[in-house]
Amino acid sequence: MVKSIDEIKDIYPFRENYHVLKSGLKYHYVDEGGGDVVVMLHGNPSWSFLFRRLISALAGRYRVIAPDHIGFGLSDKPEGFQYRLETHIDNLDDFLESLKIERMTLLMHDWGGPVGFGYAERHPDKIRSLIISNTAAFTFDWMPFRLRLCRMPLISDFLIRRMNLFARFATFMTTVKPMERRVKDAYLFPFPTPSSRTGIYRFVQDIPMWPEDQSYELLVQLEHCLWVFRERPVCILWGMKDWCFKRRFLKRWRQYYPEAECHKLKDAGHFLYEDEPEKTIAIISDFMARTSGAK
């Protein structure tokens, strides 16, 4: 069990940086290297640790920024915060605007997709290119039973916050190759208590499936703006053994971005950056080298 960030510095060797949001909350982020900017956005229940090897590989040529959403990683985890898609977008907007970045590549995974496209919709001129991996930023009417179970009244809080099952199950249900024990512990490190798991719980509750869901209208808005980026360079990486973001989601992305380059990783699950680190690094490095100067 990891109790301190110092215990994993050998595999997560980055400086700790913090931005104080307008709400007063501390927003942790990795900021390594220099040059053209790539911003990496994680999902639920991960944190910037997911991108550790990619950050190290790219930081020699680019400025790599990887924030932890509020409720995740080394960022603050208040219980009373409104953990909704809109507030996560607001936080990212507050943070990125404070850095005064003019152009960037957005790399988005899981919930990082709608959060990233929320920022992109507000600042389309700042988006140089897009890297999309196992995510959705459009409406859908299918959810796996495992997620539906975690949204059921009465038992969802017990399963996610009290028992920490959502985060624990993610350490073996998101990959094809078994994670090492220390890697599993590192993923669980930010969530030692029920209160620290509130962000995980709220993200699951906020999945916008139906029109009556709080974030549904915003997701429809984001879906309508996807076409704005059709002429930008787009790279899609997909772990084909993802039990959640199945092929139907990849098919939708191909409809929105028919000209995108698409890389199907047949032996990777949801955490494709864990299953195929060398391949994802090679694909993204090549894409960045060809498009980092795109206007």
Image (cartoon, helix red, strand yellow):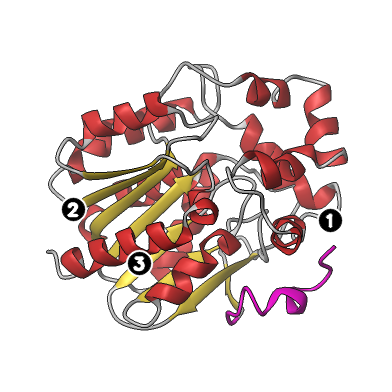
Q: Quadrant of residue 252?
A: top left
Instruction: Give amino acid for label 2.
Output: Pro
Q: Is residue 8 magenta?
A: yes
Q: Position of residue 178 (x, y in %)?
A: 66, 49
C-alpha distance separating marks 2 and 1? 40 Å
Instruction: Classify 38 as above or below 92.
Output: below
Residue 225 falls left or right of residue 6: left
Residue 6 falls left or right of residue 258: right
The residue range painted magenta reads 1-15
Q: Local crowd at mark 1 within 10 Å, few (<14), some, or many (≥20)?
A: some
Instruction: Give amino acid for label 3.
Output: Val
Residue drawn at the location 38% of the way across and 56% of the way down = 107
Q: Which residue is the site of mark 2?
A: 233
**Element type at mark 2:** loop
Q: Going from the N terminus, do you reach mark 3 or mark 1 first?
A: 3
**Element type at mark 1:** loop
Q: Are marks 2 and 1 in contact (CB under 8 Å)?
A: no
For residue 38, which numbered disc appears in the image? 3
Q: Position of residue 56 (x, y in %)?
A: 47, 76
Q: Is residue 79 visible?
A: no
Q: Going from the N terminus, do you reach mark 2 or mark 1 first?
A: 1
- What quarter of the picture does the C terminus occupy? bottom left
Q: Local crowd at mark 3 within 10 Å, few (<14), some, or many (≥20)?
A: many
Q: Position of residue 8 (x, y in %)?
A: 71, 74
Residue 90 falls left or right of residue 166: left
Q: Which residue is the site of mark 1?
A: 192
Residue drawn at the location 24% of the way across and 61% of the way down = 287
Q: Position of residue 131 (x, y in %)?
A: 32, 52
